[in-house]
Amino acid sequence: MKNGIIIILNGTSSSGKTSIVRALQDMLDEPYVEAGIDKFIWMLPHRYFDRPLWDDVLGLANQAGELGHQLVMGMHRTAEVLSRTGMNVIVDHVLVENIWWQDCVERFTGLPAYLIGVRCPLEVLEEREKARKNRTLGQARLQFDIVHGKGVYDLEVDTSTLSAEECARTIKERINSADPPTALKLLTTPYSRL
């Protein structure tokens, strides 16, 4: 059985990843299931969304608590299993922890997994946070300097200059090209020392 494609969209809160997921699902010829961080967080009982339980168990915007780590590792394993059963997967991610990067490298290297950087200037992110009303102000700022810290991607898109549909079209062209994904493989060497 052929492994399904994995598209990992990595960016801060409010960078536009969810809009890109929707556009990709509409645009791609084959079905792609969404197995992103928000889907996994919303599986929790609602009491976990209130402070101080959120901060103590799930962590902050730039670092995870124990339950946050468990959710992300479960998300990675789910994406891997879906791919190995032939399903295509989109993972909406906020890679703020080194252990998450390491797990992605170890779990997805060898699979057709594309690492896509979703970028946006900080001032635009902060304006989006204010407008959305369903995000904690300051999340993007806390994540901004660390989420793209590894700096290696198969493709990067900027949601301040491209619409979600344009980003999706660019990503579709990349995964349909003859060039295989290489970002996770390039990250293998640094993580062999962790």
Image (spheres, grey):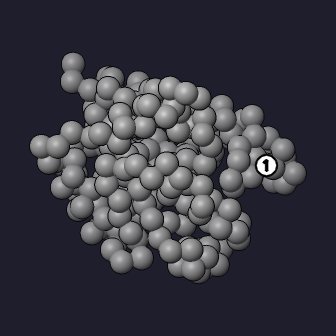
Q: Position of residue 67 (x, y in %)?
A: 72, 35
Provide residue 141's location: percent of width, then percent of height: 65, 67
Q: Is residue 191 above or below residue 28?
A: above
Q: Is residue 97 above or below residue 110?
A: below
Q: Position of residue 152 (x, y in %)?
A: 40, 49
Q: Give, as a three-letter code, the residue at label 1.
A: Trp
| Depth order, front residue of 63/128 | 63
User: Image quadrant for the C terminus?
Assistant: top right
Residue at the (35%, 68%) spot, across then down: 164
Residue farthest along the top direction in this orientation:
1
Q: Residues within 10 Å of mark 1 (few under 14, many from 20)?
A: some
Q: Could you say where residue 171 lies in the image, as x and y percent from the top left? A: 27, 56
Q: Is residue 137 above or below residue 43?
A: below
Q: Quadrant of the N terminus?
A: top left
Q: Residue at x 43, y 60 (%)?
A: 118
Q: Quadrant of residue 19?
A: bottom left
In the rendered image, the residue lying farthest to the left is: 178
Q: In this figure, which residue is indicated by the disc labeled 1?
A: 54
User: Residue shown at 29%/61% (left/top)?
Assistant: 168
Q: Residue furthest toward the right?
A: 52
Can residue 6 be seen here?
no
Residue 125 located left or right of residue 151: right
Instruction: State the residue at coordinates (50%, 66%).
Output: 15
Q: Report if residue 64 is visible in the image.
A: yes
The secondary element bearing badge 1 is classed as helix
Is residue 78 found left or right of 7 in the rendered image? right
Disc tally is 1
